[in-house]
Image (cartoon, rainbow, N blue to C red):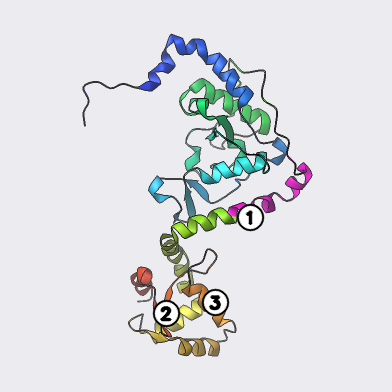
Amino acid sequence: MKYQELFDGDEILKSEAFKELEKPLIDLIARTSMWVDPGKVTNAPVYPDVKRGYPKQKGQVIDGIRIDDNTYANRAIKNAISKDAGFVNYVTCHIWPGTTYDERYHTQLANLVLIPQVVAALSDHCPSVIDVLKYRAFELYGWYPEEESEPERPDYYPEEWGEMVSESVPLSDMECNLDEYYTEDDHNLELEEYNNNREEIEIEKVRRKVFGWRYKPGQICSTILDEYMTLSQNGKCPVERDRLKSICEMQGIEKFEGNYNQMKNFGLRNHAKVFQENNGYVSLWLPVSTFIKGLYK
């Protein structure tokens, strides 16, 4: 649609009125923003294989990367600041524009800051605020994206910043057990998203894993699927489960039950759902059957 006239709210940034408020607003953000204690920040993202994507893709795993809205980043910084505190009307903001779409930086703690909701939008739209936040992150953590230049101290830079939140968990424990510190929340979040999108996630998982099984014979999953495809004439007919088990055990597979179940059932940590079963007969799971048959031609 073509408009005869377009009104852009960001034009306010060029107004004299905003210029009068700009420095006080920067000072307000400096005093009220919340940052992670530098002792808790590493060079790695909290969730290495997660990035922002289109809303309709949330929870999907595409090329091994989970698509997030801002849930993982939000959880990462709030847990790092304090697992004992509640945060109301604070927004998780990414300091470097565009980095939320890069899994290296989406949950990198040095790239995140909590800002009160009423002024948080300035971190996306006001260049002077963005420059101040970039330098503050560099000042605290010595960090900036590897493809960017070291940020320079802005002409106007606040002298007063809010204090770090005290954390009941000893800092030494956090430094030694940072991975464990996030494990439970990470699992709960993944499980929730898996249950909401499990079919799409399993389809993507099958596409990633089965190709490897096909061309790496000798693995347990490879053997089970290979024997099934042989018995079923490339997936054309169901195979009696007990027969498949017997053949696989003859091939030296001692733990058929557990591995077969992880190839049949939905599950966050399963191998990949390639099978479905009906009255003791195994067939390929319908959403991935065409893909698998194509690999085994």
Measuring from the top left, give residue 9's x and y in whole percent.
37, 21
Percent of width and height locating residue 87:
60, 37
Say if the magenta span includes residue 97. Answer: no
Mark 3 — residue?
Answer: 259
Pointer 3: residues within 10 angstroms few (<14), some, or many (20+)? some
Relative vertical location of residue 211 with respect to residue 185 in this rendering, above or below: below
Give the CA distance from mark 3 to mark 1.
Answer: 25 Å
Local secondary structure at mark 1 = helix
Q: Secondary structure at mark 3?
A: helix
Q: Which of disc 2 and disc 1 is earlier in sequence?
A: 1
Q: For the magenta stretch, what is the residue range?
A: 167-186
Q: Position of residue 5 (x, y in %)?
A: 24, 20
Residue 279 is left or right of residue 163, and the answer is: left
- Quadrant holding the C terminus: bottom left
| Residue corresponding to mark 2 | 277
Residue at image position (46%, 63%) is: 205
Q: Amino acid at mark 2?
A: Glu
* Residue nearest the viewer, comparing 138 with 34: 34
Give the residue displayed 78% in from the left and 43% down from the top: 170
Q: Which mark is residue 66?
A: none
Residue wearing tag 1: 184
Q: Count neighbours of disc 2 (C-alpha within 10 A) and say few if under 14, some if 14 to 19, many if 20 or more.
A: some
Q: Main secondary structure of the magenta part?
A: helix
The location of residue 91, given as percent across then percent down, is 53, 34
